[in-house]
Image: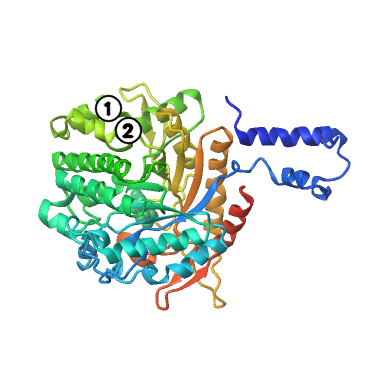
Amino acid sequence: MSTSKNDQKILGRRNFLKSAGLTAAGLSVAPALISFKNPVEAALANISERSFPEGFLWGTATAAYQVEGAVNEDGRGTTIWDTFSHIPGKVKNNDTGDVACDMYHRYPSDIKLMKDMNVKIFRFSVAWSRIFPDGTGTPNQKGIDFYKRLTDDLLANDIQPFATLYHWDLPQALHDKYKGWESRETAKAFGDYAGFISKQLGDRVKHYFTLNEMSTFVELGYGNGIFAPGLQLPQAGLNQVRHHAVLAHGLAVQAIRANAPSGTKIGLAENLSVPVPIIDTPENIKAAEIAMREENAGYLTVVMEGKYTDKFLKRTGADAPKFTEEDLKIISSPLDFVGINVYNPAGYVQAADNEDGYKTLPFAKSQPRSTSAWQVLGPESLYWAPKNVHKLWGVRELYITENGTSGTDELTPDKHIYDTDRVSFMRNYLTQLQKATAEGVPVKGYFYWSLMDNFEWTSGYGTRFGLYYVDYKTLERIPKESAAYFKVLARDNKVV
Ligand code: PNW
């Protein structure tokens, strides 16, 4: 095992204590009572086994439709989520993103909230339909200007903007014209838009994510129909949509490389399936690796390897996507980093003597969950996700592009939210992430989902993921206990 910088520092500190005669045998005062006199000693004291590597970046994430509101302002075009959320019965309480958190207008004060929490990176998404109201054609200057103002203000506050180019708000015109992601025309249009906007923002934004969570918007939007556009396609059609999503990613990578200034970094943000070994034996650890590669075969695996696995092609059979060798080259265009959204284990696995080489155990009925029914709580997922992405594909730069949890978040009469569950969630998950970084897994930053409560897709506004509570009547933002936790975490760069 190689020694990471972090390890070196920890070792350094141990040696320092030793030479100062302060290790167990010679220690005459409790560590907390030692007063360090010079800055080097003080700095060393602050590095503990819970520290993240030096320069680790702490941030928060949002997405356009979930926070911006202002859906009819400054020439924005309609999207499939506008249409879908306005169909009665599709979203809890028939909530829509019409107003959301009104971040379109309130971003200057929201940036101050981030600055106050020691945030250094912010992940937001660009609404495609603000840039090209119909998905293609004439760009809308007012939309471009909004993202210029937003990113200028972030930079002025010493926060690096990380832009996601697609967080599920497909321009409705592309759905009407091409059936959206059912057509490769949509993938081509996405590539064109990505190239265009990366040129416009090129002097401000140095990091881009192409698409957010291909697996979620494809499976839920085109497979079981609970997300926009609400389709339930047969397997062959669904596999083709999956293929168009990864193709769109690859076309965008190429277009950004061709249009953005050199030095621009490109990745994606994928909610990959994270199998976790039930018991850490070498056999189960291997089984979890095999499972991760196969269970992400239609998404991250094809992006990283430039081929569909044999098992994927066998499994899909006559319904396999139609593709060319050229497509596979585009899909696997080299990336600068990989972003992973990690909320839960896909399942606990063990080695098995079957064709797959692994078996997924059923979750216990009593396995803890958040208020989002799909979110099984398993902190180990934040260790195994980066660990195995690094191991399977040799990724040299990783970001945790989302991690968070939803809670009941009751407001007390004196306006506090004691979200002890969220604080505990962060400490438990981050302990696992810290372990991965201490072992040398190259995770460079972490974005908590989300800065504030927002439009949680089909769950509407009742499901809250924020560090800030949003009072939807007044749009006031109120810091939760977890915001205080984040502030110390980011300041000290260690699990606190
Ligand atoms: C992600 N599931 O969505 C998204 O990237 C965010 O927009 C979202 O708000 C956040 O996670 C919290 O949900 C998901 O059903 C939505 O498994 C649903 C699922 C997973 C992720």
Residue 451, given in percent of the width and then of the height, sits at 46, 60
- What kind of element bears circle 2? helix
- What kind of element bears circle 1? loop
Taking 140 as reference, is 30 above or below it? above
Q: Which residue is mark 1?
A: 309
> If the image is split into quadrants, where does the N terminus sit?
top right
Q: Decide which of 143, 439 is in the foreground and name it.
A: 143
Q: Is residue 156 left or right of residue 253?
A: right
Quadrant in which residue 45 is drawn? top right
Task: Check if mark 1's residue and mark 2's residue have beta carbons within 8 Å.
Answer: yes
Taking the image as drawn, is residue 493 in sight?
Answer: yes
Distance between the alpha carbons at the discs numbered 1 and 2:
8 Å
Residue 217, given in percent of the width and then of the height, sits at 27, 50
Q: Amino acid at mark 2?
A: Thr
| Residue sitting at x 57%, y 63% | 116
For residue 15, the mark is none
Q: Decide which of 257, 89 is in the foreground and name it.
A: 257
Q: Which residue is mark 2?
A: 301
| Residue sitting at x 42%, y 71% | 106
